[in-house]
Amino acid sequence: MAAHRKPRPSSLGRPAARTAATLALASAATATLFEGSGHADPARPDRTPAQVRAEIDRLYQQAEAATERYNGAKERAAAARASYDELRDEAARRTERLNTARRSLGAVATAQYRSGGLDPAVQLALTSDPDQYLRRAALAEKAGDRQAATVTAVRRELSALAQLRAESVGRLGALRGHESELRRQKATVLGKLAAARELLARLTAEERARYEAALATRTAGTASAAANRSDATSAAASAAAPAGAATARADRASGDRAPVAPATGRASAALSFARAQLGKPYVWGATGPSGYDCSGLTQAAWRAAGVSLPRTTYTQINAGRRVSRSELAPGDLVFFYSGISHVGLYIGGGQMIHAPRPGTPIRIAPIDEMPFAGATRVA
C-alpha cells in the first residue's frame, strides 16, 4: 500500500520554503566569507575607531600594491604602443617603396603602349643604322634588367607588407590587452583609495586628529626605539671589550644604526635630488616633478644621478646588487612588505626618504616603520 501512496510534496518545493532556504544559504555563505577574510566588513557601522584606522591603513597598503601593478601595466602598454607604432611606420615606408616601384612599371607600360606595343627586338630590327641598332640593343638589355629588378622589388615589398600586416594584428592585440589591464589596475587603485577616504570621513574631527597624531607618533617612536637599541648595544659592547673592538661589534650588531660613510658620487647625487623633493605630495602613478609615488621618486632620484631604473618596485629590487640590512649604505634602495610593494631611498642611520601614501608628503622616516623585505645597491 505504501508504494501506491502519493508522494508528499517536499517542503523545499513550496515557493515560500524555497525562498527561506535560499536566504539561509546566502546568509551562511556571507558569514563564512567574512569569517575567512580575516578582517571586518568596511561598511559595518559598529566598528570601533581603532578598527577603522586599521582598515584605512590596510586599504592604503593595498592601494599602493595596486599602484605598482598599474605602473607595470602602464610601462608594458607604452612599450606595446611604441612597438606597434614602429611597425606601422615600417609598413608606411614599404608602402611608399612599393608605390614607387609600381609607378616605374607603369611608366614602362605606358612607353610600350605609345610605341605600338612592339617587342624591343622587332623595333631594333627595323632600324637601318647598325651602330644605332647596337646602342639601342644595349640600352634595351639594361632596361630589361631594370624592369626585371623592379618587378622583383614589387614582389618583395608585397610579401613584406603582408607579413607586417599579420604581425601588426598580433601587436595590436597585445596593446589592447595591456590597455585593458591598465584600466583594471586603475579601477582597483581608485576603489581602494575611495574606500579609505570613505572610512576617514566616518571618523569625527577628534578621531581623525588622533589618527594623524598616531601616524606621527608611530614614526617618531620607531626612530626612538631604533636609537635606544643602538645605544644599548654600544654600551654593552663597551663594557665587555676595549673601545675599538666594542665599536666594531656594535656596528655589526646594529647595522642600520651604525655610523655610515657619507654618500659620494652617484649616490650623493640621487640623495640630493630626493632631499629636494621633501614635502611634495604623494601622487599615485606619478613620476614628478610636482608629485611622486614611491617607485617614481626612487626612479627620478637615480635618473638625476645618471642611472636608469625600471619603473616598479618589484623590478627595481633586481636593478642592482642585493645587500643585507647590515650592509646598508646611503643611496641603497630599501624595500618593504612581502609583495615588494614599497620602496625608499636609504640615507643612513636607519632612515630613508620615501613617498609614503596619499595625504602624506614625501618625508624622512625610519626603515623600521614597515616590514623590511630587502635592499639593493644600484651603483
Image (tube, grey):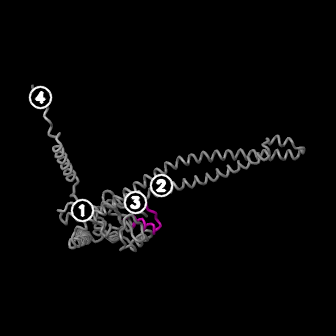
Q: Indicate the amino acid at tag 3.
A: Asn
Magenta stretch, residue numbers:
294-313
- Provide the residue designation for mark 2: 80
Earlier sequence position, callout 3 versus callout 1: 1
Q: Is residue 126 left or right of residue 300?
A: right
Question: Gap in Å between the C-alphas at discs 3 and 2?
Answer: 14 Å
Name the quarter where the N terminus is drawn.
Answer: top left
- Vertical comparison of 295 with 38: above or below: below
267 or 345, which lies in front?
Answer: 345
Earlier sequence position, callout 4 versus callout 1: 4
Question: Gap in Å between the C-alphas at discs 3 and 1?
Answer: 24 Å
Q: Secondary structure at mark 4?
A: loop
Q: Secondary structure at mark 2?
A: helix
- Provide the residue designation for mark 4: 5
User: What residue is at 25 percent from the left and 67 percent from the top?
Assistant: 200
- Provide the residue designation for mark 3: 71
65 or 224, which lies in front?
Answer: 65
Residue 231 appears in the picture as rendered = no
Q: Position of residue 31 (x, y in %)?
A: 19, 51
Q: Indicate the amino acid at tag 2.
A: Ala
- Give the farthest residue toward the left: 1
Q: Position of residue 104 (x, y in %)?
A: 71, 50
Q: Indicate the amino acid at tag 4.
A: Arg
User: What residue is at 42 percent from the left and 65 percent from the top?
Assistant: 299
